Amino acid sequence: MGCPKEFSIKGGMGAALLTQPEKVKAILTSLTQGLSCPVTCKIRVLPELDKTLELVKIIESTGVAAIAVHGRTITERQQHKNRSYVIRAISEVVSIPVIANGGSGEITCYGDFETFRKATGASSVMIARQAEWNCSIFRKNGKLPLDDVIEKYIRYAIEYDSNVWNTKYCIQQMLGSLQESERGKVLLSAQKMEIICDLWNLGDLLKEKKQEIHSKSENLKRLEDRDVELQVALKRRRISDENIHEVDVKFLRSNYGMDDLPKSVLWNWILENDLDKPVYNTEQYEKSFQSVITVNGVKYTNRCLEKNKKNAEQAAALAAVIILGLMKYPKEENQTSEKELDGQDHSHSENNSGVCHNLTNNIPPVR
């Protein structure tokens, strides 16, 4: 409730609320009762001291944890003297912490914080303009040279890819009257980050960062293209061979012993039924593998990609034994059905042996 800007006042926001104590009470009460975190508020002072004190008592009654006070009225600006005596009067009539604000004009070093705090009787101090001019104001050992602060700021701007307009504005705030200097005038006309960085001998650092960002961007693009190509390849294969029967279940080696590995179970079944040896066709997609197994003239595969060829073959065999009813679908796995994957309806076996394309339908009988 401290913003005195015209757009806020006309919209009934900010400092416009200072003359509407009942609305202030309703807003703050709703917040303090509805939130689990502490609620604080910030105000400007009113022209009349008694009305200001009445307002802060109402604010305190809502349950706020603290109140920040800017010692100027709605119509006053930074060239007007801050009313520290009003902040002191507020500090004396409320029991909650008071945060004194508006003292940037009289705070020029770290020690001035305490002087301002004592003058206002507040529990703490809030500043804005002095921090924008030179954020090292918070150093107990004294402020750093302005050039050092600007250089450090530009380094952060480069590191986090800040845009030229935001960077330029912040440096302008730091320079103040120095904007009329030769370097300041170049800054004012700058429309590119390169020009700003060159003014503080950081052009090479900007080039290095841009190259790093470009390399990362290219790597991300390659990864994205790879994923797209992989999905296209898988889709093309499914379209080109609709007779492949699929499941969507990850092969986890720890779930099986040597005798009940999918390939072992399938091989024993093939021997018992005197069938031809199964044929595995494995394809690699970047660092992932997928295998299709042909058993008795029927193709089976697993939609889950594996990290190596060996696991890919086991995954394909797992698809085959599930669909053939030789092994139950792993219920403990959190699997995604094909219906969820491609929006189509598929059959389900009664023993939950898998959610597969066509399952055992149209699979040639064992000879």
Image (cartoon, rainbow, N blue to C red):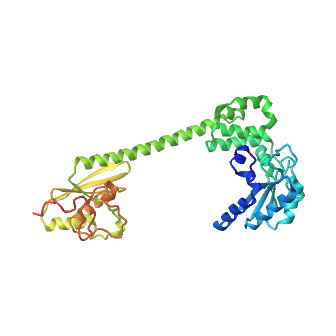
Does residue 355 sit above or below 140 in this rendering? below
Q: In the picture provided, is 4 more to the left or to the right than 83?
A: left
Q: In the picture provided, is 291 more to the left or to the right than 211?
A: left
Out of 275 and 335, give the one closest to the viewer.
335
Out of 33 and 325, give the one closest to the viewer.
33
Quadrant housing the N terminus: bottom right
Q: Is residue 122 visible?
A: no
Give the residue displayed 76% in from the left and 32% down from the top. 184
The residue positioned farthest toward the left in the image shown: 367
Does residue 25 sit above or below 155 in this rendering? below
Does residue 217 sit above or below 281 in this rendering? above
Does residue 121 sit above or below 71 in this rendering? below
Give the residue displayed 34% in from the left and 58% down from the top. 340
Out of 88 and 256, give the one closest to the viewer.
88
The quadrant holding residue 342 is: bottom left
User: Residue 61: where, in percent of width, then height?
Assistant: 76, 67
The quadrant holding residue 116 is: bottom right
Q: In the picture provided, is 102 more to the left or to the right than 248?
A: right
Q: In the picture provided, is 122 more to the left or to the right than 30?
A: right
User: Residue 229: where, in percent of width, then height?
Assistant: 36, 44
Give the residue displayed 18% in from the left and 67% down from the top. 269
Q: Is residue 196 visible?
A: yes
User: Residue 65: where, in percent of width, then height?
Assistant: 74, 65
Out of 128 and 361, give the one closest to the viewer.
128
User: Residue 363: where, in percent of width, then height?
Assistant: 16, 60
Quadrant housing the C terminus: bottom left
Count all numbered tags in the image, as a single digit: 0
Give the residue displayed 35% in from the left and 56% down from the top. 306
